[in-house]
Amino acid sequence: MFVKRIWGLFVKVLFGNEPILLPENRNARMKASLIIAVPVIVQNLVRHFQLVIDRLFLGNIDPIYLSVIGNVNVPYGTLDLFLFASGTGLSVLSAQALGAKNMKEAKILGESSFTFLTLMGSAIFVFWQLAARGVFTVLGAQQVLLEHAVDYVNILSFSSLFLGIDITSGALLSACGITSPIMLTGLLKNLLNLLLDWVLIFGHFGLPQMGVQGAALATVIANAVGALVLFAVVLLHEKMPFRLKLAEILRASWRAFVRTMKVGLPSGIETFLWFFGQTYILRFMNAIDPYASGIYTLAHDLFILALFVYMGFSRSTLTLVGQFWGAGRIREAKQAGWEGQGISLAISLIWGAVLFLLGKDLLGLFSRDPHVLAEGGRIMQVASLFVVFQTFNVVIGNAIRATGDTLWMLWTQIFGTVFVIGVSALLILGFGWGLLGVIWTITLDEFLRGAMNTARFWWVRPPKNTQETSVPSIAEKEAT
């Protein structure tokens, strides 16, 4: 009976979420934003905690494993997040199609993305199998660090085979406002990853102790299970505004995917350029000492926790702004954007205060090494500014993307990449600031690009051939 009840609750969360389309007033927008954001927040935190758990287990075995994960995450994340960012095109266009009540368009776009993003993920898998050693050699990894990094990414890259399914499923569900399944699959992945980490890293239940390779294998299995469950929800959810069919996914339209990529590709290139700048920083850190990248990435995983919270509201901002923009309701689209920014700013201010006051204590949970705590503690204090400035880049950036203008964010990222490479070289190598130069570089970058985005969204206007429409408020309806 207990198992039956748990299964019933599982199915209800997966399939009971009603779609959210064009909320009529401010209160409805705020409620819709919360309904969309909370499951996405859980998913983001779960995905992040997969890395944190790996660090928690591995960092207490040998501090060199922190640098292994740090060296892998930057280049590996470059390609994975390139696909995630390219999937932004699907989120934007499907949200706009739903706002315009064009369900057939949203359906065709989704089917094409399932097929072609999966093919792109498979290409990423092949790349890592063939080029891992060369990539980490170029990044300056040597001897033991190099061998561990190659072993780790060769296994971890199997996750890329399921990435297209995960991205497309999440984008379609978010565009419809059906985000509870995203939360549940995120929790499922995290619990599975935690269990498998404990079993495979340390060698329980008669299995060999696999160390860093076990951490990679645990992540792969958890990601595969989560992606397949989410895919099943998209195919079987009775309340989806449109019905996808597996046979039509296999006959997907290349032209529809090209339309998606025209909107999403600038975001993909933007992400690639961001990580390109981070790669240069990683090289500079490897030149400082073998532990520098591990210290920085450990601190980074803590100070960006606020990002994974307000990214939920960033996603709801993209969904709501996209729906209103597609329906021609420009005033409400702008209001949804500023409302999402306000909530996110409040979250970042709270977390910034925590970092400034307790940052060193948080680092102490993962390492007792005096060098790690001293260097990481200084990073955390500056990071309290970083998390505030970043909200204007992330949330308002998504509001701009939701209007269909993804090129703006690409141009600002080109500026940001040049800025990061130049200023980090000056502060780290020229002035000898070390890791403090890294954190100041990325903080100034977020401040400048956030200011540009805010000005852009304030002045953004619809195309000249768009006729603005509006829906009367409840008060206006009652007056008539």
Image (cartoon, rainbow, N blue to C red):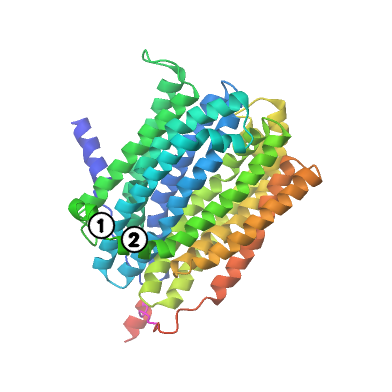
Q: Nearer the viewer, residue 25 or 21?
A: 21
Which residue is located at x 57 percent, y 54 percent?
Answer: 273
Identify the residue position indicated by label 2 in the image. Answer: 257
Q: What's drawn in magenta, residue-wise? A: 468-473
Q: Amino acid at mark 1?
A: Ala
Residue 191, horizontal then vertical, whole percent: 38, 32
Where 108 sits versus 115, above or below?
A: below
Where 311 sits versus 61, above or below?
A: below
Residue 327, horizontal then vertical, whole percent: 35, 75
| Magenta stretch prevailing secondary structure | loop
Which residue is located at x 54 percent, y 71 percent?
Answer: 457
Number of disc labels = 2
Residue 27 seen in the current view: no
Callout 2: SS: helix
Which residue is located at x 42 percent, y 16 percent?
Answer: 203
Callout 1: SS: loop
Where 93 sits versus 300, above or below?
A: below
Identify the residue position indicated by label 1 in the image. Answer: 252
Question: Do tag 2 and tag 1 residues touch (Cβ < 8 Å)?
Answer: yes
Residue 387 covered by magenta stretch: no
Residue 379 seen in the current view: yes
